[in-house]
Image (tube, rainbow, N blue to C red):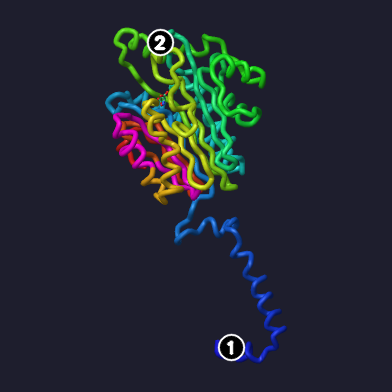
Amino acid sequence: MYAFTRYFHAMSKTNCMVLFIAILLLIAPGCGSGSSATDENIAGGESQPRWSLALHGGAGHFDSEDLSAAQEAQYRASLSTALEIGIEVLESGGAAVDAVEQVIRILEDDSLFNAGRGAVYTADGGHELDASIMDGDTRNCGAVTGIQGIRHPISAARAVMDRSEHVFFSGHGAGLFAREQGLESAPPEWFDTAKAHKRYQKALAKWEDKKMGTVGCVALDLQGRLCAGTSTGGMTFKQHGRIGDSPVVGAGTWADNRTCAVSATGWGEYFIRTAVAHDIHGAMLHGSLSLEAAARHAIHEEMGALGGTGGVICVGNDGTIVFEMNTPGMFRAAANEAGRKSVLLFADEGQ
Ligand code: ASP
């Protein structure tokens, strides 16, 4: 080092400058904006995932005693099928918005869940579907509420985001727009599933079955883009025109590359009253809370404190995956580039 310093002093100013530029050129590739694989994979000595994915199939008051072993196996299998679709998209370099849409389309076709095909019945005995999607890269979003006869409401929401100058369509207009965009229609029989019908009959008799089963997905892609989406049939026996949180951007869905992507499920009225998904983002952006602390606060201190129930799935812009709920169960699954893969049903199953 001493010899190097003496040599340095002995050099002319021009030579010094040339040496300085050469050193800069040599080290520049390693100190760019963090886009090289090495930089992104090493954070505090731990490997950090470059893509991350989480999904849910609804939160509710169920525990291991409410599900038979066969039912439990069915839920786990369905969640993991949807998870694999998302992994495939993200692993091959696909966009977070595509991963979210593809995952939710699979769940919408699965009658186990309260979205698309398995949507619950309204008080009038019909099906009015809600969905929303938000691209955290552009903060563009699209939503539909009370849409009828469309097989994949999440794709209708995406079409609103990508192909209209508006962000939210309702009822008849939402259906017209979706059909104009060439989205697949489905006849009323498609939505007449035994499970949803049983819930309806129970609700008719007792007016108290508020079973949930909404689906949602959040993703971070290899380009660092976040996306969140949510789709639901709403709450069993909902009154005509009732809108929950799922299609309300800021309540049931939010994504912003600066912070996180969030999809919620639960008692929609409470999620709207406390703008849960945006609250988590805001606490991170303006209050510097971690994703975990922000989600915990939103679910327990805000939404839960008013008497609401439900949960959220979140992915941070560093790939962190967080599940938070105040119900005994939430159907959920997650995967990331670092090799995590989990399918969980009950709250006490851990992250
Ligand atoms: N949040 C949905 C709604 O209130 C229901 C659910 O998540 O199960 O419409």
Q: Secondary structure at mark 1?
A: helix
| Percent coordinates x, y for residue 110 in the rendering | 48, 22
The foreground one among 330 and 274 is 274
Nearer mark to the viewer, of 1 and 2: 2
Q: Is residue 238 left or right of residue 25?
A: left
Label 1: few (<14), some or many (≥20) within 10 Å? few
Tell me, for residue 227, which label it has, or none. Answer: none
Let me know if residue 195 appears in the view. Answer: no
Residue 93 falls in image quadrant: top right
Is residue 37 something one can see in this rendering?
yes
Q: What residue do we see at 30% from left, 26% from top?
A: 61
Give residue 123's mark: 2
Q: Picture quarter containing residue 281?
A: top left
| Residue count near mark 2 (Cα–Cα under 10 Å), binned few <14, some 14–19, many ≥20 | some
- Is residue 320 inside the magenta stretch? yes
**What percent of the width, then of the height, locates residue 67?**
32, 24
Question: Disc 2 on helix, strand or loop?
Answer: loop
Q: From the image, tell me which residue sits under label 1.
A: 5
Quarter in which the C terminus is drawn: top left
Measured in 3D between alpha carbons, the distance from the residue under mark 1 to the one under mark 2, in whole angstroms, is 83 Å
Badge 1 or badge 2: first in the primary sequence = 1
In the rendered image, residue 123, in percent from the top left (x then y), is placed at 40, 10
Q: Amino acid at mark 2?
A: Ala
Q: Nearer the viewer, residue 41 or 297?
A: 297
Residue bounds of the magenta highlight: 295-322
Question: Residue placed at 45% from the left, 21% from the top?
Answer: 243
Q: Quadrant of residue 60?
A: top left
Amino acid type indicated by mark 1: Thr
Ligand 1 occupies quarter: top left
